[in-house]
Amino acid sequence: MSEQVHPTRRRPATGKTVADRPAVGFAGYGASGRSPLKAWEPRYRRQVIVSDLVATLVVVLTVGSVLVSRHDEVSPLELLALESITVAVVMASLAVCRVWNTAVLGQGAEEFTRLGRGLFGAVVVLGLGALAMAIPGARLWVFVVVPAIALLAFPQRYVLRRLLHRRRAGGDCLLPVLAAGDPLMVADLISRSRVASHVGWSVEAICTPDGRGLTGTNIDDVPVVGQYLDLADHVQRGGYRIVAITPDTYWTPRRLQQLAWNLEGTGTEMVVAPGLMDVAGPRLHVSGVLGMPLLRVSEPTLTGFRRMVKEAVDRVGAALLLLFLAPLLFLVAVAIMVDSRGRVFYTQKRTGKGGREFTMVKFRTMVTNADALRTRLAAANEGAGLLFKIRKDPRITKVGQILRRYSIDELPQLFNVLAGHMSLVGPRPPLPEESAKYGPEVRRRLLVKPGLTGLWQVSGRSDLSWEESVRLDLRYVEDWSLALDAVILWKTVRAVLSGEGAY
């Protein structure tokens, strides 16, 4: 393989070059000397399948032993048949829902959505079978076993994903990408892939219209290896996992179709970025009309049944969390009173859905005259855009530093969620003076309720730039789904425990 076809470049995060980096598999597998597709992807997929099977077996055998001890009318033979059928139905349902498709493993909410869909399908099949066979205790079995499998399978998936992301951050388990398109669009793709290393894309070569980059023969230290006409040849010889096509006038439907034909049999996936709108997730649908592939963009789900479900989850979740966290809230209140004089709670006007103002409540983390001191500290502001933030704010109390680091000061906002002013997940609640300066685009943040947590909190919090914070909030408004909410809530726990970006 020539150096031009499979170029060598340095990865800023790890210091490894593509040529120097061994083909390391997942979870300790050594170099295999095979292409990236054969090196770690099938192994990771097998690990996910085994984890799901183990979760199913553990739950089935555990519940089966309890069923035998409490129901003498269930014979060992009937129990063995019930256990075998349950394992077979659960695994078959997961397979039918394409839960183990490598395209969804390791990133995004789709992996967990498919897992939930597969387990729900197993509940339906087993429930109908239980009614038909009239096995004693079978219906109870169905509605205990499958939810228990979910409680074990979902965390296992998350642990495997975190291990995969850790290896990707170190430069392993990456998908080698050959990008082709306008140099500016390719540069944006490279920048995004480096920031979001968990996606696993490593742009290692580029093809442009004239075979040149923005500065000579490379774009952001990634070499340009040829023109569009050379693309198929480079893929067939270079072992790339993905060909990423970015917008350019050259790419007509006919040329894209011809490229797809040329890539058949290479094991390379072609990914085309429409470059029309910054919209993704459940709002995008591809359909064929008059023999033409059309990308349909549906309206954001701001009302309807799913929003009713979200409202119910918010209210019930907030009530349960307040009940569970009551001892912690009491101890924090005592610590604040002992540490400094003043009220335990701090209230502030914030802008909610539709621009309506509400009073947000938090634990007090600053001295009582903090608002008056803000004008004196204006020159020290480190916040991005319209935000006012100081990394080492002198107004913060000793207890307040701890509360802010782990976001404990935000917990009283559960009362706002319970009252319907906020949601568990949503955009950051802005101050009225901030929202008054919003342009038409940024005001779309106010189409939904602000959240106790959101994409902004699990992606860096105060370390984010103003533009990135706005982009994440708008992405949430555009691409909201119940699955995305579940992923954000899960990631919030890790973000809070790490304390990263909180000050």
Image (cartoon, grey):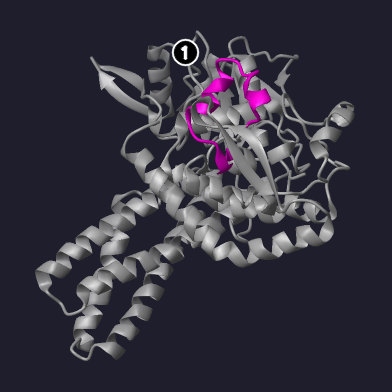
Residue at 52% from the left image edge and 41% from the top image edge: 422
The image quadrant of residue 435 is: top right
Give the image location of residue 286, x and y in percent.
Answer: 34, 26
**How many numbered circles does the render carry?**
1
Residue type at the position of mark 1: Trp
SS at circle 1: loop
The image quadrant of residue 459 is: top right
Q: Relative to 18, does residue 316 appear above or below in the rendering?
A: below
| Magenta stretch bounds | 430-455
Can residue 204 be seen?
no
Q: Is residue 344 left or right of residue 266?
A: right
Residue at the extreme front: 342
Can residue 199 be seen?
yes
Residue 477 is a magenta residue: no
Give the image location of residue 263, x and y in percent.
Answer: 43, 28
Task: Read off the residue under disc 1.
Answer: 251
Residue 432 is a magenta residue: yes
77 vs 69, nearest the viewer: 69
Give the image location of residue 366, x and y in percent.
Answer: 80, 46
Residue at 34% from the left image edge and 48% from the top image edge: 98
- For mark 1, does the 10 Å Cα neighbourhood hold few (<14), some (14 to 19), or many (20 or more) residues? some
Q: Relative to 212, does residue 8 appear above or below in the rendering?
A: below
Give the image location of residue 352, x and y in percent.
Answer: 54, 32
314 vs 463, nearest the viewer: 314
